[in-house]
Image (tube, rainbow, N blue to C red):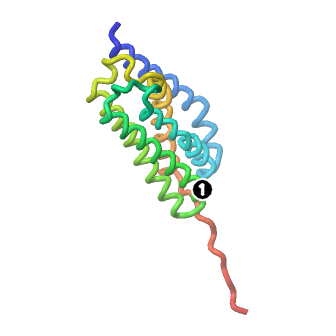
Amino acid sequence: MSSLALFGISVALSFTAWGAVASYYLWPALRQRSAEEALKAILLLHGFRFVGLAFAIPGVVSAELPAAFALPAAYGDLAAAVLALAAFGALRTRAGTALTWVFNIFGAADLLLAFYQGSRTGLADTPGLLGSCYFLVTAAVPLLLITHGLAIRILLQSRVPAPAQAKFSAA
């Protein structure tokens, strides 16, 4: 079987398995929590996206991995991790809700761009270029995209409350 077919099967089965995990376990657990608490769990998961920096490290990936894929994937993941952690820290504020939206839009676009750049540069046709990062693409990215969808659903269904303003009385 071709490398492209094996890659496609791996990604499709990962989406299927993570979709089932999300349907049976993640979403039921998240919807029992407040929107803020549910988003915290998702944002912390995405805080580990700094691992994508491995795309820029020869030896972890092939030195021939096209920079047109590797650098945007590595630094896009780093930016997504920083945004996720910033949103986590500020979640109780209006700015935190806005940061969560920015993170979700940027983070999902980053992952979709990486899939596009990967297909454009022929990564699935060239075994070995991704090295151990093959598992990031085939196992982690589907989970990350699914959790982006869950976070957007949470944001759309309920407002994450901002802290109550302190009221001062003149006495």
Closer to us: 125 or 6: 125
- 127 shown above or below 103: above
In the picture as drawn, the residue positioned furthest to the right comes out as 171
**Residue type at numbered disc 1:** Gly
- 63 shown above or below 88: above
Q: Quadrant of the N terminus?
A: top left
Q: Secondary structure at mark 1?
A: helix
In this figure, what is the number of numbered marks? Answer: 1
Q: Quadrant of the C terminus?
A: bottom right
Q: Quadrant of residue 71?
A: top left
The residue that appears at 39% across and 14% down in the rendered structure is 6
The residue that label 1 is drawn on is 89
Closer to us: 62 or 171: 62
The residue that appears at 30% across and 33% down in the rendered structure is 117
Density class for disc 1 (Cα within 10 Å; few <14, some 14-19, many ≥20) is some
Residue 77 showing in the rendered view: yes
Q: Quadrant of residue 8?
A: top left
Image location of residue 46, percent across then percent down: 53, 42
Image location of residue 45, percent across then percent down: 57, 40
The residue that appears at 36% across and 40% down in the rendered structure is 72
Residue 15 showing in the rendered view: no
- 63 shown above or below 93: above
Q: Specify whether 153 is left or right of 88.
A: left
The residue that appears at 44% across and 23% down in the rendered structure is 134
Image location of residue 113, percent across then percent down: 34, 38
Q: Specify whether 124 is left or right of 40.
A: left
- 12 shown above or below 67: above
